[in-house]
Image (cartoon, helix red, strand yellow):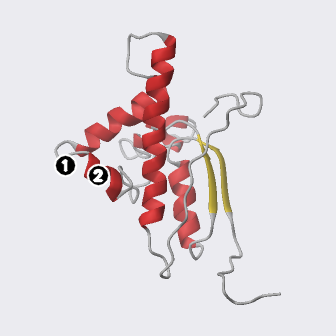
């Protein structure tokens, strides 16, 4: 029985193993579908910073270009993260954060590298989610939650 107290959606956006900016594009699709609910399972982050068009051309065989953000998607995504990073060289700071999330900081033990990657990945994904939580579509806010799959048998990357 419909009480009329909740919003109905005809779409739910699900994005699995979304490389680069694919998670951000899925969020944009959810917004365009009357702020539809979405579930994201993102993958790498640094590819999102790659220009989709280089020298006036897009090479659809190059995964780094297919995974790049469209011109209407900017980083950081949320005012929450922008407030944490100083405005000076904001894009460069985000680029470093995204690259650390993918490959770590450089010479370090494997356990240190993984710890740095996880912390940076958490910040990048919280930035995405906070941008949704900050959004006010039709007077409603998104309820967001960050979760991690701990069983490597389910998802090999364990993110």
Q: Quadrant of residue 94?
A: top left
Q: Quadrant of residue 78?
A: bottom left
Q: Quadrant of residue 12?
A: bottom right
Q: Which mark is residue 87?
A: 1
Q: Is residue 59 above or below residue 127?
A: above
Seen at 47% across and 81% down, the residue is: 139
> Where does residue 57 sit, x and y in percent of width and height?
43, 45
CA separation, marks 1 and 2? Answer: 7 Å
Quarter occupied by the N terminus:
bottom right
Element under label 1? loop
Q: Which mark is residue 65?
A: none
From this viewpoint, is residue 69 visible?
no
Q: Is residue 124 above or below residue 31?
A: above
Q: Earlier in the sequence, mark 1 or mark 2?
A: 2
Seen at 62% across and 40% down, the residue is: 148
Seen at 48% across and 36% down, the residue is: 121
Judging by the rendered image, the residue that carries numbered circle 2 is 82
């Amino acid at each position: 029985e419909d009480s009329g107290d909740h919003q109905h959606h005809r779409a739910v956006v699900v994005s699995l193993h979304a490389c680069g900016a694919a998670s951000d594009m899925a969020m944009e699709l959810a917004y365009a579908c009357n702020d539809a609910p979405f579930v994201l399972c993102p993958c790498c982050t640094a590819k999102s910073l790659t220009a989709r068009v280089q020298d006036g051309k897009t090479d659809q065989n190059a995964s780094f270009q297919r995974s790049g953000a469209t011109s209407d998607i900017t980083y950081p995504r949320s005012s929450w993260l922008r407030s944490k990073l100083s405005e000076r060289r904001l894009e460069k700071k985000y680029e470093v954060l995204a690259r650390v999330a993918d490959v770590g900081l450089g010479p370090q033990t494997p356990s240190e590298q993984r710890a740095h990657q996880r912390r940076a990945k958490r910040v990048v994904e919280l930035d995405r989610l906070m941008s949704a939580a900050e959004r006010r579509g039709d007077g409603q806010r998104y309820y967001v939650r960050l979760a991690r799959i701990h069983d490597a048998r389910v998802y090999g990357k364990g993110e």
